Image (cartoon, rainbow, N blue to C red):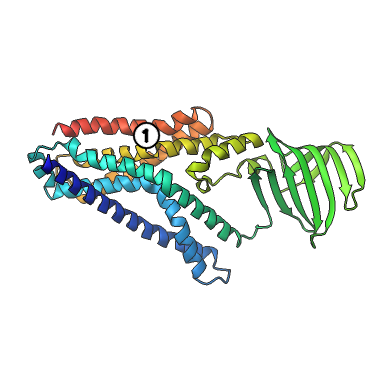
Amino acid sequence: MIRTSIINKYLAVEFGKIVINTILIFFCLGFIMNLYEEINFFKDIDVGIYIPVMLSAIIVPGLLYNMFPFIILISGIWFFLKIKKTDEVTAMKVSGLSNFSIMLLPSILSLVLGIFFITSINPITSVLVKKYEIMKGSFERDKDYLAAITENGIWIKEKTKNKNNIIRSSNLENENLMNVTIYEYDNENNFIKRIEAKSANISSSKWILQNVKIIDEDGNILSDNTDNIFYNSIYDINKIESLYSNLDTISFWNINKEIKLLEERGYSTKQMETKKQKSLSFPFFLLAMVLLSGVFTLGIMVKESNYTYVFFTIITCVLIYFFNDFSAALGRTEKLSVEVAVWMPIVIVFIFSAVGVIYANQK
């Protein structure tokens, strides 16, 4: 019992060291690659090197979070390969441990690590990603155009050659913005007039307003109950529906709140529900990755070269990535439910890994 406790402590420490080293390696690679992109973005803007470095440092943790299942897969292969190459696996088997027992502790650690990342790290990375978008957005050329969904409704800001417009709508129904109010200002931000409409069809960038009332700067009604008034905008239904294109800004603890808000505003909640299911499945995804790495190493008795393991790791990462993407696409097109689309790849990987573990445990 004491010997097993010592071995488990050793396995936990070594696996933890390798995970940390892998994270540091990926952080450095991600930082360098993203820094190159930021420098290229700011090449025509006089900001110095501080802003690109700061933006890279802020965004890389969020990228690492999304890549963490593959970081765990690589860490697992590195760890099991290390104890296999040094014949520590043989020594552990002599002491009475099986291949499954050797895989068990790293698997439990990955599960705990997944829960910790979802509940503690994800809220931090979501804040950093939001900070990144705000900082970089201040340098965007089209910053005069923005749209947002808030508890007070849907807000849109647009700038034309002669006017600045602020648009508010209570909610979205199919292809129509409901209870629309358009505030028009000149280039000096002097109020010109207000346009109120019961609805606005936004199937194209040429909106069709219904039941329109136009009020000037003095409060005088210029027209009332007018239909088929056209308003030219840069936004259409597709752009409006993609306001939540970057879900990395949403913390795990705020997902249910955001789903409720989208439902109240008439938006589809599939993307947010997909994020919720991915968050819930994240620890089990890490567990499957550790088991899979154990199958690739401890399940193969032939002494393969390191290049072979690198090749298998890359191929596996690519296959899992595209399988996840394909399954998510089926969910978005409603060919599968959101739950099935998210959990199916993980269950398949887990089943494959479990069968491999049984096979490896017999050796």
Dot 1: few (<14), some (14–19), or many (≥20) neighbours within 10 Å?
A: many
Q: Position of residue 315 (x, y in %)?
A: 32, 43
Q: Position of residue 186 (x, y in %)?
A: 81, 58
Q: Mark 1 points at which residue?
A: 346
Quarter of the image containing the C terminus? Answer: top left
Q: Which amino acid does label 1 sit on?
A: Ile
Q: Position of residue 14 (x, y in %)?
A: 22, 51
Residue drawn at the location 67% of the way across and 40% of the way down = 237
Residue drawn at the location 43% of the way across and 52% of the way down = 63
From the viewer's side, name the closer residue of 28 and 11.
Answer: 11
Q: Relative to 282, is 354 above or below? A: above
From the viewer's side, name the closer residue of 162 and 275.
Answer: 275
Q: Residue 321's quadrant in the figure?
A: top left
From the viewer's side, name the closer residue of 29 and 43.
Answer: 29
Q: Which residue is farthest front?
A: 2
Q: Relative to 282, is 62 above or below? A: below
Q: In this view, does 328 lie to the left or right of 198?
A: left
